[in-house]
Amino acid sequence: MNQVTPTEPPIATLERWMAGPRFAGIPARAPDAPVPALSFEFFPPRTEALETQLWACIRRLEPLQPRFVSVTYGAGGTTQARTHATVTRLVQETSLTPAAHLTCVGASRAEVDDVARRYWEAGVRHIVALRGDAPPGQAYQPHPDGYHYASDLVAGLRRVADFEISVAAYPETHPTAQSPDHDLDNLKRKLDAGATRAITQYFFDGEVFLRFLDRALAAGITAPIVPGIMPVSNYGQAVKFSAMCGASVPGWMGSLFAGTDEDHETRRMIAAIVAAEQVRLLQANGVDEFHFYTLNRPDLTFAIAHLLGVRPQAS
Ligand SMILES: Cc1cc2nc3c(=O)[nH]c(=O)nc-3n(C[C@H](O)[C@H](O)[C@H](O)COP(=O)(O)OP(=O)(O)OC[C@H]3O[C@@H](n4cnc5c(N)ncnc54)[C@H](O)[C@@H]3O)c2cc1C
């Protein structure tokens, strides 16, 4: 005879809702709290169409009056001329303060110093100093006459001119670091060598960043560590890129984006909500500086800046 399993009586809706844990909402920004300081990152365009896209992006974000905007340096210095052209155009044609990314990889110290000197002569006063990466599949090898690590580059730049210098930080540890503690020592070395701020690799879990701040403070770091925010509108691409740069993608993000591959509009709305929750959580925890990886697309960054309380200003 088949055994009949008695079915549980259904739990009434309200009882089900009320039985779970309760959370308070993220507190809103106090009306008199200072407006956060923002910075935006762009990459130098490869084609005329991308150049038009970049400049539309710059013009849209310019009225938000970011503290600075930075322009990346292609892997191995491959965009040297394009980075230089973009940065100098920013100096000449906009009200923005540009920061030029500069890497050590594949160049002698004299060559890197020369690039830096030309930036100084063009009126650029801020450098984001990085080591850079080897081409895919190869281990990093410093140039025989080059700066080995970003900390060496920071020290070298200080000898070239009185630049403001930002460096990179890794809340989830740089992928080839010996250990999280070695990586934190390295960050301290870069700041001690003369950098005044760190900008982080992007991350998606706010707690990862907040715990990193605790560790940095305990290690004696007091310079600002500005969270790098990447509003993700292409989830698949973000997963691939994150695997390379050591940023973890939480499972909940996959669930949120699942089924939206062909649905651009829904994907963008989800992207905005994910980034909005991330920055609001950080803001509620006292963070008031943010660096946005814009990918040369302004809309998500503009909307999230609005949520943070940043409004366009007449120049
Ligand atoms: C905000 C930001 C912007 C970026 N922009 C660019 C860009 O424009 N162009 C580009 O090509 N890449 C860019 N990158 C990527 C960056 O170049 C890579 O992550 C690179 O692998 C490390 O650069 P770094 O400046 O952090 O290196 P470093 O600080 O030199 O560290 C590199 C590794 O070496 C280790 N290390 C450092 N010093 C020592 C030592 N003395 N002994 C042993 N180990 C040591 C560190 O722990 C780390 O694992 C950016 C990254 C970030 C977070």
Image (cartoon, helix red, strand yellow):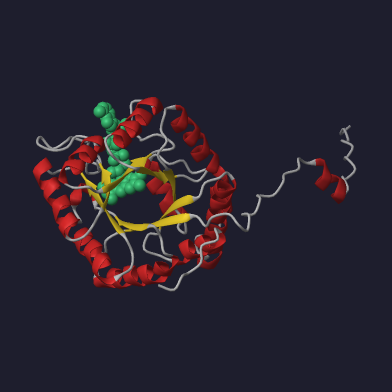
Q: Quadrant of the N terminus?
A: top right
Q: Where ligand 1 lies, by quadrant?
A: top left
Query: For residue 260, which quarter of the picture?
Result: bottom right
Q: Position of residue 129 (x, y in %)?
A: 26, 45
Q: Position of residue 180 (x, y in %)?
A: 40, 28
Tell me if residue 244 can be seen. Answer: no
Q: Position of residue 154 (x, y in %)?
A: 24, 40
Which residue occupies the foreground of this view, 284 or 162? Answer: 162
Relative placement, left or right, of 24 versus 148 is: right
Tell me if residue 206 can be seen. Answer: yes
Please give the count of numbered marks on the rendered protein. Answer: 0
Relative placement, left or right, of 310 versus 40 is: right
Which residue occupies the foreground of this view, 185 or 132? Answer: 185
Residue at the image position 39 percent from the left and 68 percent from the top: 62
Relative placement, left or right, of 105 versus 200 is: left
Residue at the image position 50 percent from the left and 64 percent from the top: 262
Is residue 57 depicted above or below 209 in this figure? below
Residue at the image position 42 percent from the left and 29 percent from the top: 220
Q: Quadrant of the C terminus?
A: bottom left
Query: For residue 43, which quarter of the picture?
Result: bottom left
Q: Position of residue 287 (x, y in %)?
A: 52, 46
